[in-house]
Every structure is written in structure tokens, then in C-alpha cells.
Amino acid sequence: MSLSMNSTETWVNQRIKTEERDAYGNGFIDESKIDRLLETVPAPDWEQLEAILQKSLAVETLSLEETAALMRVTDSKMRQRMADTALEVKLKVYDNRIVTFAPLYLGNLCVNNCHYCGFRCENTSACRRVLSKEEIREEVRVLAGEIGHKRLIVVYGEHPQTGIDYITDSLKEIYSVKEKVRNGWGQIRRVNVNGPPMPIGELKELKKVFSKPKRVIIG
């Protein structure tokens, strides 16, 4: 299915919901505050450092001020203490394991022109594709059945042909595949979504698709 230039431009113009954008003012990341803290917050002494690290060990979110203080540390013994704490937090949260996600590119059509990305609209050498439901099922059958992956990161460009309806439909297809393997069933248990920014309404549509929490991570 192809779309005319006019219909694509109309879709693009409707993507930005000004009322949702303006609700954040200049944005939810205060860059000026971050720059100011990086310049003015002093390096912590041992007592202050230990208090921050204990908060990290409790898996609590550090404040901007606390993070800036850690970035000012230059003492080698303090930095080693920070590294040891980071490893302890990592083991506490993830244990001694490495979690991998197999990438699955669903479509590389995109209306944007980000210079670092091969999907960019001005990349005329790219072969543009959007996978059909049958192609998605075959890819997942191989990944979950033959190879044994349980987690995917799925990738979409920002384009009307891979909009919210396509995203939700493709995720349903991915979770529907159940392949018989030697020791049971091969099936994708978790999907990370690498997709474009979405308005609130589309995020709600994604949420409605899945009944189990944390099965889909959007990034």
C-alpha cells in the first residue's frame, strides 16, 4: 500500500498535539538547571558520598544535585568506592546475568531526516520495506523457535504506513506465535518497542493491547 505525498504531509501535520506539547512548557528536562548544578555543586566528602551511595544501594532515584556531586568526584579511592557500589547495585537488580534482545525491524519507512539514522527520508539508497503479518510470523517463528530467543526489540520508523494501528497489530502477531521446540514451546515473552514519539492517545492504544504488565517497554 502506498500513500500520496499530500496524504503523508497531512499525517505529519497531525502528529504534533500542541496542547500536549505545551503542557510541558519548555520541556520536562531543565537543561539550564543541569548545567548550573554541574558548575556549582561541589565534590562530596566521604560522609556525603556514602549517604548518596547508600541511597543507590536502596535502588532509590538520585536527585540532580546528588548526581552532579558524584560527577565531581576526582579522588581515586572515592571513585573506586563508587565503582564497587555500582557493581553491587547491578547484581542486586539483575543478578549475575546478561539479558539480550534480538532486533526485529518491522518497517524502515520514515518521514524524519535524522542524519545518524539509515531510516532518514533523504536516504535514497535504502530499500524501503514494511513487513506483512505473514512475514512477521515467519521471522518470530525462527527467532523464538529455531534460535530460542524470548525477548525482542522491535523497530519502526515514523510513517503513516507503520502508525499506531500497524504497531499494535504487529505486536499481537509477535505474541501469537508459539513454536514447538525440543523442551516445550518457543514464544516471545517480552517486547521492547523502539518507535517514534507518540501522543497520549496512541500510548493508551498500546496499553489496551496487553493485559499483562511490563510485557511491552516503550523507548
Image: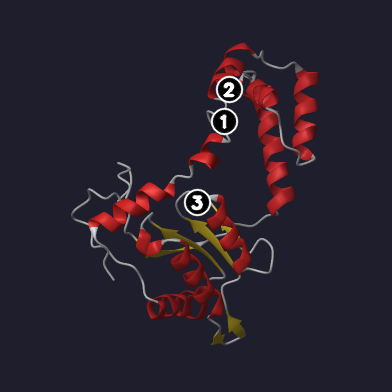
Mark 2 vs mark 1: which is more N-terminal? 1
Q: Which mark is residue 34?
A: 2
Relative placement, left or right, of 50 versus 36 is: right
Q: Which mark is residue 29?
A: 1
Examine the rendering and report whether any part of residue 26 can be seen.
yes
Relative placement, left or right, of 2 versus 176 is: left
Mark 1 vs mark 3: which is more N-terminal? 1
Residue at (61% x, 70% y) in the render: 189
User: Which image quarter: residue 96?
Assistant: bottom right
Count residues near mark 3 (Cα–Cα under 10 Å), then give few for <14, some for 14-19, many for 20+. some
Q: Nearer the viewer, residue 179 or 154?
A: 154
Which quadrant, please, contains the N terminus? bottom left
Q: Nearer the viewer, residue 9 or 109?
A: 9
User: Which image quarter: residue 125?
Assistant: bottom left
Q: Is disc 2 in contact with disc 1, using a CB cutoff of under 8 Å?
A: yes
Residue at (66% x, 29% y) in the render: 80
In the displayed structure, 6 sits above or below 133; it is above
Residue at (45% x, 51% y) in the render: 196
Examine the rendering and report whether any part of residue 148 can be seen.
no
Mark 3 vs mark 2: which is more N-terminal? 2
**In the structure shown, which secondary structural element does the residue marked by tag 3 occupy?**
loop
Residue type at tag 3? Met
Residue type at tag 1? Ile
Q: Position of residue 99 (x, y in %)?
A: 59, 59
Residue type at tag 2? Ile
Q: Position of residue 172 (x, y in %)?
A: 53, 74
Q: Nearer the viewer, residue 162 or 171?
A: 162
Residue that label 3 marks: 198
